[in-house]
Image (tube, rainbow, N blue to C red):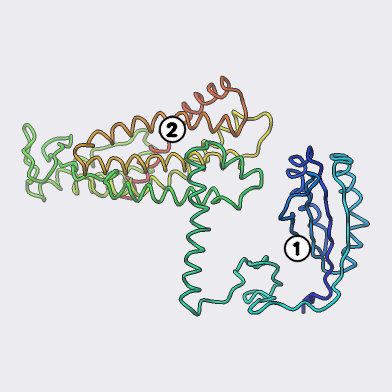
């Protein structure tokens, strides 16, 4: 059975840092990484950085790092094995501009929790050091047994989770490249993670697009049974095409003509026709019979899935363009997750403005203007995001953006062709 350390067994290791005014900025940037290194020592359980509520009279800045450690042996191990190198690093960076006072404190009496306070997490039994469990993340308060507690939970979700979501959207929309830079700078907790952000925004976009008939239209293709080409009409009562039969001709005659037309279709080369030809001809006949409804539905369903093929392709292109200094492939993939999330967010705004323009005749031109403005902003957004994250000059970034645009068109075309084939076979 795993041994549970009691409060009386724990040791507090405290480091008081008095920082000169000219070293405050550099010390503040260095300190979090230093604390993470200290916490790698075995037996270190919890760390917090404190500052005085009132500024010091001499203008210096005071920071207190307080570590909770399981045993005295763990403190001794840290002081012998890790502390000398870490102290030398701090001394080399700041010299006499930072003065340290170090203390090792042991419990002198039993700690008594306040009224209603919990000392262990009810979910995983880990020791609590704050409002949340460091092991599983559950809040320290008890389950909602009153309306006030339930409303408190609802308010917490709205102000914290949703607050983080809105902060992420603001950064995504108006600070190109910022989220990617923050993600790889290990500042992730304040934002929605890239893949989750992409999924949420793309679902909103494709859901709204399907509701507004972006992929499916009431103006469906109607079949002219006497011709090898389909005649297009907006309803089943369309006038007959020249030399052909009306759109509401005998369904059996139309189905026979559809099957005949699709059976004559051959795919070149022959090996490709042997591989996918039967499925394509069957889908062709079905699409001609139902006016293209099944094919339109399949395309609308497959485009979101095919984006998961398109994004890795573009990340591979970025890997080629930014080969020096060497970057990991996942950096480019996260970059494109953020960029495409921003593009979907922009497209969602265009759709909403288009809906408003359709509902309000006086604003009928809003959708077209929004589309042009969105295209210009998207072009600038990609250039700016590349410039912010990768750090190249304006001219070089512009050249690479042009190459990215060409690769974008080629990759998107290949992705759409693949989507069409998959949709035709699955329609």
Residue 296 position, x and y percent, is 28, 46
225 shown above or below 208: above
Q: Which residue is mark 2?
A: 378
Tell me if 236 is positioned left or right of 398 in this view: left
Alpha carbon of mark 1 to alpha carbon of mark 2: how far? Answer: 44 Å
Numbered tag placed on residue 99 in the rendering:
none
Where in the figure is residue 75, as x and y percent of width and height?
A: 88, 63
Give the residue displayed 54% in from the left and 33% down from the top.
Answer: 385
Q: Are marks 1 and 2 in contact (CB under 8 Å)?
A: no
The residue where tag 1 is placed is: 46
Residue drawn at (48%, 73%) of the image: 150
**What residue do we see at 66% from left, 47% from top?**
186
Q: Position of residue 361 (x, y in %)?
A: 19, 39
Residue at the far top in the pictured view: 395
Of residue 116 and residue 194, the one placed in the foreground of this image is 116
The foreground one among 342 and 234 is: 342
Q: Nearer the viewer, residue 365 or 315?
A: 365
Examine the rendered structure and indicate whether residue 316 appears above or below residue 292.
above
């Amino acid at each position: 059975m795993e041994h549970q350390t009691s409060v009386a067994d724990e040791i507090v290791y405290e480091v008081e840092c008095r920082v000169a005014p000219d070293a405050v900025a550099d010390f503040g940037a260095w300190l979090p990484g230093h604390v993470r290194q200290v916490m790698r020592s075995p037996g270190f359980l919890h760390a917090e950085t404190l500052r005085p509520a009132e500024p010091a009279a001499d203008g210096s800045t005071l920071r207190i790092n307080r570590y909770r450690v399981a045993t005295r042996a763990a403190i001794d191990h840290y002081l012998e094995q890790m502390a000398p190198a870490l102290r030398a690093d701090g001394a080399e960076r700041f010299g006499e501009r930072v003065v340290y006072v170090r203390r090792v404190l042991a419990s002198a009496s039993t700690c008594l929790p306040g009224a209603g306070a919990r000392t262990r997490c009810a979910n995983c039994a880990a020791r609590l050091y704050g409002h949340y469990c460091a092991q599983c993340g559950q809040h320290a308060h008890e389950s909602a047994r009153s309306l006030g507690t339930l409303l408190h939970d609802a308010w917490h979700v709205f102000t914290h989770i949703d607050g983080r979501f809105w902060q992420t959207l603001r950064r995504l929309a108006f600070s190109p490249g910022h989220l990617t830079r923050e993600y790889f700078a290990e500042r992730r907790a304040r934002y929605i993670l890239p893949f989750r952000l992409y999924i949420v925004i793309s679902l909103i976009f494709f859901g709204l697009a399907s509701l507004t008939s972006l992929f499916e239209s009431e103006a469906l293709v109607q079949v002219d049974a006497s011709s090898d080409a389909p005649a297009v009409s907006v309803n089943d009562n369309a006038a007959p095409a020249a030399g052909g039969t009306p759109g509401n001709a005998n369904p059996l005659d139309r189905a026979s003509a559809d099957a005949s037309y699709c059976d004559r279709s051959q795919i070149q080369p022959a090996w490709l026709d042997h591989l996918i030809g039967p499925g394509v001809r069957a889908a062709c006949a079905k699409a001609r019979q139902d006016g293209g409804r099944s094919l339109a539905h399949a395309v609308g369903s497959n485009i979101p899935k095919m984006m998961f093929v398109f994004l890795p392709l573009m990340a591979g292109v970025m890997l080629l363009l930014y080969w020096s200094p060497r970057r990991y492939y996942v950096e480019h993939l996260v970059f494109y997750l953020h960029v495409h999330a921003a593009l979907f967010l922009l497209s969602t705004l265009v759709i909403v403005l288009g809906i408003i323009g359709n509902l309000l005749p006086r604003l009928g031109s809003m959708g077209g203007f929004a589309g042009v403005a969105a295209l210009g902003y998207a072009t600038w957004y990609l250039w700016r995001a590349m410039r912010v994250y990768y750090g190249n000059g304006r001219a070089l970034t512009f050249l690479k953006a042009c190459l990215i645009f060409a690769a974008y068109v080629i990759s998107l075309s290949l992705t759409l062709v693949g989507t069409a084939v998959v949709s035709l076979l699955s329609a």
